[in-house]
Amino acid sequence: MTQQEERQGDRADAARMATEFVAEGNRRMEDFAGAQSEFWDKLQNSNRKWLDRMQNEATMAADFASRLTAARSLTETASLFQNWTAKHMEMAAEDARRVIADTQDILAAGARFWTNGGDGKGRGH
């Protein structure tokens, strides 16, 4: 093999390696962008749920106030407070479940930032 043929072979190898390097970089950037998009989608979904929860609480409070104002006896008032308390206990339990589920979803999506764009291989692979 002549020196010229060797140089051409070296150039071809270098070009192929550069192409592979760029392709791998593009793949990793796409994976990272996908992981970032998933992370923000999870955050937005969680925010929507909590905003809905606050709106439900405001509606419930307004309903409670109107019923309390319309109450005609101490027994009716006590019953309203009992129902209000029971509903709040249910909502607190639901809130706890939602916090745990949302936290798990957000942490799982955020963990993709610490891997190679979500391919599951981790750093150094």
Image (cartoon, rainbow, N blue to C red):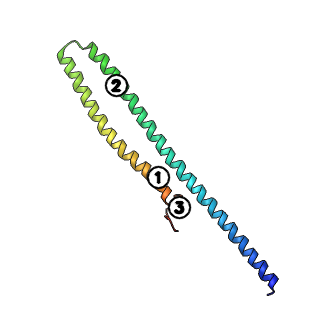
What amino acid is at disc 1? Gly
Kind of residue at disc 3:
Asn
Q: Residue at x 60, y 57 (%)?
A: 29
Does the residue at mark 1 contact the one at mark 3 (Cβ under 8 Å)? no
Q: Are marks 1 and 2 in contact (CB under 8 Å)?
A: no
**Tag 3 or tag 2, which sits nearer the N-term?**
2
Density class for disc 3 (Cα within 10 Å; few <14, some 14-19, many ≥20) is some
What residue would you read off at disc 3? 116
The residue located at (54%, 58%) in the rendering is 117
Q: Residue furthest left?
A: 75
Q: Position of residue 84 (x, y in %)?
A: 26, 26
Q: Nearer the viewer, residue 75 or 65?
A: 65
Disc 2 versus disc 3: nearer the observer: 3
Circle 2 — which element? helix
Foreground pick, 12 / 77: 12
Q: Answer with left or right where residue 64 lies relative to residue 114.
A: left
Expressed as whole percent of the image width and height from the top left, the position of residue 33 reads 57, 52
Q: Which mark is residue 110?
A: 1
Residue 118 spot, x, y in % from top left: 51, 58
Separation of disc 1 and disc 3 at Cα? 12 Å
